[in-house]
Amino acid sequence: MAFRINRRTALTGVAALAAFPAAAQDKKVIVGTWGGDYSRLLTKNITPLVKGFEVVHSEEQADPRKAKMMAEKVLRRGTSDVQGLSANDMYEMDQQGLVEQLDYSKMPNAVNLIPSMKYAYGIGHIYSGKVVLYNPDMMKAPEGFADTLDPKHGNKLGIIDIQRQYNMVAAALASGGSVSNFEPGKERLIACRKAGARIYPSNEAFAQALKTGEIACGIMWKARAVQWQNAGIKVETVAPKEGVPMYVSGFVMPKNAPSKEGGYAWLNAMMAASAQENFAIDMGYNPTVTNAKVAPDLQKRIGFSDEEKKRLVDLDYGYMGKNDVAFQDWWNKSFKA
Amino acid sequence: MTDAVVRDPGPARPPPSYGGGAQAEGGSRSSSLTATVLIGPATIFIALCLLAPLAILLRYSLNDFEPSRKMMVEAVTVANYVKFFTDPYYTTILGTTVRIAVTVTLACLIIGFPLAYVVARSQSRFKHLLIIAIVLPLFVGNAVRAAGWMVVFGSKGFFNSTLLDLGLIAQPFEIMFTEKAVIIGIIAVNLPFMVLSLQSVIEGIDRAVEEAAFSLGAPPLTMFRRVLWPLALPGILAGTILCFILAMNAYATPFLLGGPLFKMMAPVIYNEFTQKTNWPFGGAIAFILMAVTLSLTIAANILLQRRAAR
């Protein structure tokens, strides 16, 4: 049997070849996310629920992913379909005009979303609160941020560098400031630093220091404390009396997402009750959908009492975004000097 | 075959005495065409992948930045360069970077020279294994190597645990997140480059010239200073330039081993681009780093060659 290749068959072949990668790419959904545990748990709890799309994770810290979104602004097709960011970063990306205004009718699971987690430009995936962490073998329970961010702890106080914004919020709340005024907290942070407070580059390095007894206290999300307790680290939490700053982690869809259909499918799976329940079990974060069932004992550890819930404070994302560069400069040049 | 490889077919060959000018011109045209074809791909690659982005970055570095909106604003200003040189925070970081790079380069030269000499003069049938052992660290990425050092340097890491268990120290040494850790880390990264540069040159130095110096009564140090050092100078220059440039631009090691309080230029540039999204200032710092590295390298090169010529 002889094959004859004429102009038409050649063109058909070329068209098929050209169409194949495009089609294959359209059936993928690219998820920009942090690496480590978070990415692993997204794969475990959400990927199996995304039908009809291959889920690919693009792992990086939030800042490089934000920079990439900005660099890709002029491109018709970006390189990610959804991006995992903190509520503050989601707000900032929206202000930059980089993210899609979401059509909630395309996500059936969104009917169960807690209203405060429903942003026009993004969806809250999980939330926790910034609390005080301490080692009960090394010190008695502090009452709040003022009692923790105190020079009296010397080098037994640990401060996480990448939690700069939350450290500044906590110091502000401890010093008569507010989520819209960080200035009063600066002096307190400098005093702690001068007294020998240790600064750690990552959450994991902070956890390691807690484990080895290098430090006795610090501030961190309650969810991480639960995760570290599960890992055998001796650590207890206190919901600070000055207020519990909320940490919301969510997802946005870049305006130039190559597969918006895939992005919506992934976001819908993210809001499935089972995915949210498993995240509460695995990572200690509170679900953002009302139909997720969390066991009472787990709820007691990861959640907040009614009294504590009254102290939950959302951040002023506008204020933080507007002053972020100035705060970074202060943090690097004055606090870490 | 060997003859064909060794023979120089280039323009240095005297023109043939027969055939006249037209043929000579044709040969020259053909060899310049060959040269164009040979250097073309590399030139295009460099132009597209290095010079074009550099030109864009240079243009960005002259732009303005609006901090409250984190937006680059079109302008033509040298404000970013002025800001760098008038802010002690940044000039201190530049000073630290140069100091670390010089320290690391000198350390690599001092540690690397004897090692390179031994390898070069070795007649052992296991010589190739020695060379592989030197190159082996390059098989592992910088970040992975830094992670290994983190395990060694931690307050309960291998180093401190061993000393504590042996009762040699009562309190662990603070190595992690210090300048010491960064220096040790960068030396470990750069040393193979220095050793390989030196070893290849020392191998080309005839052993007989060293023996001649000894036979004329020169003690080892004099032989080293008057014979070996000048002859090995091309390798020393290549090795030090390579080490210095790598140390000036080190990113992963200072970032991972230096911790939040230790600053070198490359992590600061990354921070300006990614955290502050201040591309104009990040671009300006990148060009300043490039200019300083280039200037110091050229200056050191000239200085060393002049001293050798004396």
Image (spheres, coloured by chain):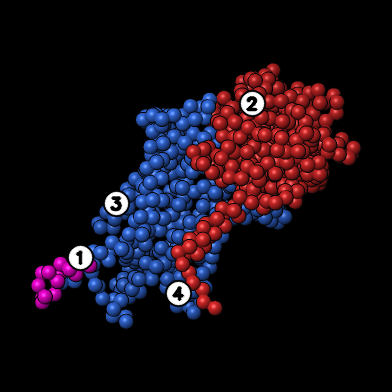
Chain colours: A red, B blue
> Where, quadrant-wise, is the N terminus of chain A in this rendering?
bottom right
The chain to which mark 2 is attached is A
Residue B154 in sight: no
Magenta stretch bounds: B15-30
Disc 4 crowd, CA 10 A, few/some/many (<14, 14-19, 20+): some
Nearest-to-viewer mark from 3 and 2:
2
Nearest-to-viewer mark from 3 and 1:
1
Q: Reply above or below: B44 against A226.
A: below
Q: Earlier in the sequence, mark 1 or mark 4?
A: 1
Disc 1 crowd, CA 10 A, few/some/many (<14, 14-19, 20+): few
Q: Residue at x 85, y 26 (%)?
A: A306
Circle number at residue B302: 3
**Residue B142 in the image, given as x and y percentages of width and height:** 55, 54
**Residue A312 in the image, given as x and y percentages of width and height:** 77, 25
Circle number at residue A317: 2
Q: Residue at x 29, y 55 (%)?
A: B305
Residue annotated with mark 4:
B122
In terms of image quadrants, where is residue A311? top right
Of helix, strand and loop, which one carries label 2?
helix
Circle number at residue B29: 1
The amino acid sitting under disc 1 is Arg
The amino acid sitting under disc 4 is Ser
